[in-house]
Image (tube, grey):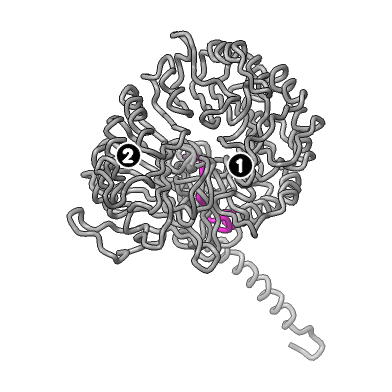
Amino acid sequence: MGLSGRSPIPRIKYLLKVHSKALSSSTTTTATPTPTPTSPIESLPPHVISEIGRHCHLLRDVLNFSLSCRRFRTTLAPILYSTVELKTNKQVKTTLASLAKLPDLSRHIQTLVIRPNCAEWTASNDLLDESAVADWIMHIASDLEALESFTWDGLEMPVDMLWLVLRTSCPNLKCLYTSIGEDAVKGSSHLFDFSGLTRLGVTVKCHSFEWIQNGRPPIEKLPRRFWEMLIERCPLLEELKIGGPGPSPRMFDVRHVLAGRWPLLRQLTLGDMALHPASGAREQKDDWAFMQFFAAHPGLQSVALEHSVGSDAFPPSFYLPPTALPAVESFNGPVKFVRTLPHKRLLKHLTLTCLHHSVSTFPPTYATLHELSSLVSLNIWIDLSFGGGRGVPAIHDDGHIFRSLLASCPGLMHLEVMCFTRPAFHVKEFSHALRLSPQLTSFVLTKLHKSGDEDPLRSAVRIVQDNPNLKRFTLRYALDSWFSQSGGRLKQLGSYEVVADEQGKPTSLLVYEMGTKSFGGEYSRTYVHTLPAMNSPVKKTHGRRQSWSSGSSHPPVSINSRSSASASSGSSSEKSHRSTLSQGSRRSVFSHTSTLFSHASGSGSGSRSGSGSHTSSFGSTKG
């Protein structure tokens, strides 16, 4: 190459650069194979995954299934978030704030239950501003396109604008439940603008019982527009609830309800309301209208009469023709109404609303229960303070009363007992009495808390060893006696689900416990407890605990972190069995709020097992 020739260096650099790019492109293509599912189940189409989720018996299984991968999480979100129930103030604030940031989850909600200032877990100095809660709901209302049922269970009715926003933003909303406090019920309320409702509930909340010393409250009238909405614009009504359990701080004249005729009515609840004139003079025509109403609704399956025993504003008992109420399987009310039901032998579920507080109140109940051959579920409210002491005859002993109660209904499968005996009895007495019911599979026990009570887990282990037939149960410890079945403050709550081996022998417990600490604050925890051998004595040690992350099928209680709690039962929670352990709660998610939201939004990895913070905010309950 001469001095005048061109240098080959630029040409060489160019060729090397082109070759380098080609080589890089070839390497990248070779190193990135077509993605393939790591397991056969990941290749399933979305509709199959959804069908698997719908057939899962427990919602926690759906939750764990959804945590497998992001695709499953997205596909199963409509099942996980179909029902959202918020039972503590912290849960209300945290969840509503999260839903506002994640509208893709809000659109899956079909049932929304808001319980601000829940009596069971809210101290008088920790009340939440309910108007602010209503504002949060209005903020997310435009995203609740699938909402079909809304429940407001606060101390007062929510701000009126909320009803207008829900009616205009949620076209599928056909089920409404609201509470009434001390504030006046205005006839101009937007609540009365709804039409075509299939379920309606208006419940009077009791803040305290200080009003009792002044005698029964005066009888008030509900607005005319309420009756117009109910009787004229809701012909397809399936469920109606008016009033709350007695004694009620407010009594409304509800005689107009007896003029209604709803061919599809299946559930009716009449609380401590007035079906007689305010003058107190009972007229035969009023009782006749009451009986005619029930005779005109043969499709009723559940009837609840929650008035105070001995109320002058309510008929004394049923006077129905033998053909009336042929389909009733569930009844709430005093024993005298049970006795006069035309088809009481068909009853399967019974809640006795009268307090059994003396020796003389039990024999009539035993006799009535003996006649209910189909009974499988019983809820009873008792106070055994008259028994259990020294010198008390054995027939009045706490254990004897429990045994007599269970012997009266040998087919019982579920039992709920609210017992406020002073001094409180021991759980082991109750556990020994349950041996008389080998077919019993679940129960809920509410008793007074005392400092000498053994550890709830230890009690649970003893109960399983005494009664290996049990599948699930709940222990609730109240801070003080409750003056009505509407509930009160709880000190501790434990829900336990029994896991058995192939031979049916209990091997472990799925545990959810929560309560209040001695020096303030709340706690909750979920874990798996391995049971000792069936013949081993109950030890004071807790045994081996493992963290358990789940969408538990237990009570409608909230499950939050160990350091900051949230929740309440059943079902009662605890309730359905509102209570804690009902079969209808498969749609309830006891999920860690932050875990669910982080996984659903794709942010954060979360922990599948032991984050320690769970919440029953989502879904409805299994227990």
For marks 2 and 1 on the same chain, the one whose residue lies earlier in the sequence = 1
Q: Where 90 falls versus 109 (above or below)?
A: below
Instruction: Name which quarter of the figure residue 582 lies in.
Output: top left
Position of 16 with respect to 367 (left or right) is right
Measuring from the top left, give residue 540's x and y in whole percent. Answer: 29, 65
Q: CA distance from mark 2 to mark 1?
A: 39 Å
Count of numbered tags? 2
Q: Main secondary structure of the magenta part?
A: helix
Amino acid type indicated by mark 1: Ile
Is residue 76 visible in this depiction of the protein?
no
Look at the numbered disc 2 and give the secondary structure of its residue. loop
| Residue ID for mark 1 | 212
Measuring from the top left, give residue 427's x and y in whole percent. Answer: 33, 52
Query: Residue drawn 45% across and 39% down?
Result: 52
Instruction: Name which quarter of the figure residue 435 lies in.
Output: top left
Position of 222 with respect to 332 (left or right) is right
Measuring from the top left, give residue 309's x and y in whole percent. Answer: 51, 30
Position of 17 with respect to 587 (left or right) is right
Query: Residue drawn 77% across and 42% down?
Result: 159
Is residue 161 visible in this depiction of the protein?
yes
**Label 1 neighbour load within 10 Å: few <14, some 14-19, many 20+:** few
Looking at this view, is 338 or 542 the one in front?
338
Range of the magenta residues?
586-599
304 falls in the magenta region: no
Query: Residue drawn 64% across and 59% down?
Result: 126
Give the number of the mark in front: 2 or 1.
1
589 falls in the magenta region: yes
Looking at this view, is 188 or 88 the one in front?
188
| Residue ID for mark 2 | 441
Query: Residue drawn 52% across and 28% down?
Result: 310
